[in-house]
Image: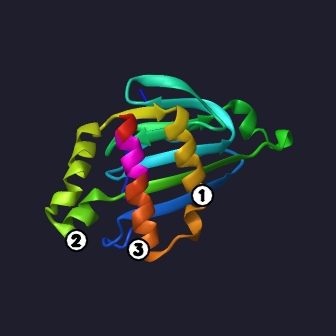
């Protein structure tokens, strides 16, 4: 069994949502976990997805939500590691730091539904249909958001995940 790498994403300790674009020959290929919730849209590439006891495939258009500390890896197919193949992968990811949000806003009644996401610790699920399409559309423009608009969009995305879960 592969050892799980546990790491903390670099954040400012005051940042609720972190946006990341992954581009390259292949995705990060080490089994890992982190305390942030993760919402990932696969734009290009294909391979094997592992999370906990689940083993499946991923491909362009897939949307995944991972709860805090869910061991996972998006392992690109072997052909992506062959330089001569010239293949590329692309994915957009949001990392949600609930601890930073809770520290900043405490126990606001309006944010209590976010507590439900704590139940997803160590779990993952794939999103489909209308919810997946809404998430893909929002993530395609998320990089341009700042400040309150960024926060509002992040909460909206979590609302869609909650509806699907």
Determine if residue 34 is in view.
Answer: yes
Q: What segment is highlighted magenta in the picture?
A: 157-162
Question: Is disc 3 surrounded by few (<14), some (14 to 19) or many (20+) residues within 10 Å?
Answer: few
Mark 2 = which residue? 104
* Marks 3 and 1 in Cβ contact (< 8 Å): no
Above or below residue 165? Residue 149 is below
Mark 1 = which residue? 21
Q: Which residue is at the far right?
A: 84
Above or below residue 159? Residue 148 is below
Q: Which of marks 2 and 3 is nearer the N terminus?
A: 2
Mark 3 = which residue? 148
Spatial CA distance of label 3 from label 1 is 21 Å
Give the label, 3 or 1, closer to the camera.
3
Q: Which of marks 3 and 1 is nearer the N terminus?
A: 1
At x 40%, y 35%, the residue is 164
Above or below residue 46? Residue 20 is below
At x 19%, y 53%, the residue is 112
Q: In which quarter of the image is the C terminus?
A: top left
Q: Which residue is at the far bottom?
A: 147
Q: Nearer the viewer, residue 83 or 100?
A: 100
Give me the disc on residue 151. none
Spatial CA distance of label 2 from label 3 is 14 Å
Q: Quadrant of the N terminus?
A: top left
* Place of residue 7 in the rendered image (x, y in percent of width and height, measured from the top left): 37, 53
- Which picture quadrant has residue 79? top right
Give the label, 1 or 2, closer to the camera.
2
């Amino acid at each position: 069994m592969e050892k799980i790498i546990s790491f903390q994403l670099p954040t400012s300790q005051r940042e609720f949502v972190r946006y990341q674009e992954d581009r390259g020959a292949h995705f990060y290929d080490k089994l890992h976990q982190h305390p942030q919730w993760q919402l990932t849209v696969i734009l290009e590439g294909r391979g094997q997805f592992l999370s906990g006891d689940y083993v499946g495939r991923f491909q362009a258009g897939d949307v995944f939500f991972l709860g805090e500390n869910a061991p996972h890896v998006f392992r690109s197919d072997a052909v992506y590691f062959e330089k001569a193949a010239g293949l590329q992968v692309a994915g957009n990811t949001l990392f949600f730091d609930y601890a930073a949000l809770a520290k900043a806003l405490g126990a606001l009644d309006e944010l209590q539904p976010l507590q439900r996401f704590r139940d997803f610790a160590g779990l993952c699920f794939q999103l489909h249909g209308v919810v997946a399409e809404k998430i893909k559309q929002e993530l395609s423009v998320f990089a341009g958001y700042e400040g309150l608009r960024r926060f509002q969009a992040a909460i909206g995305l979590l609302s869609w995940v909650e509806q699907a879960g």
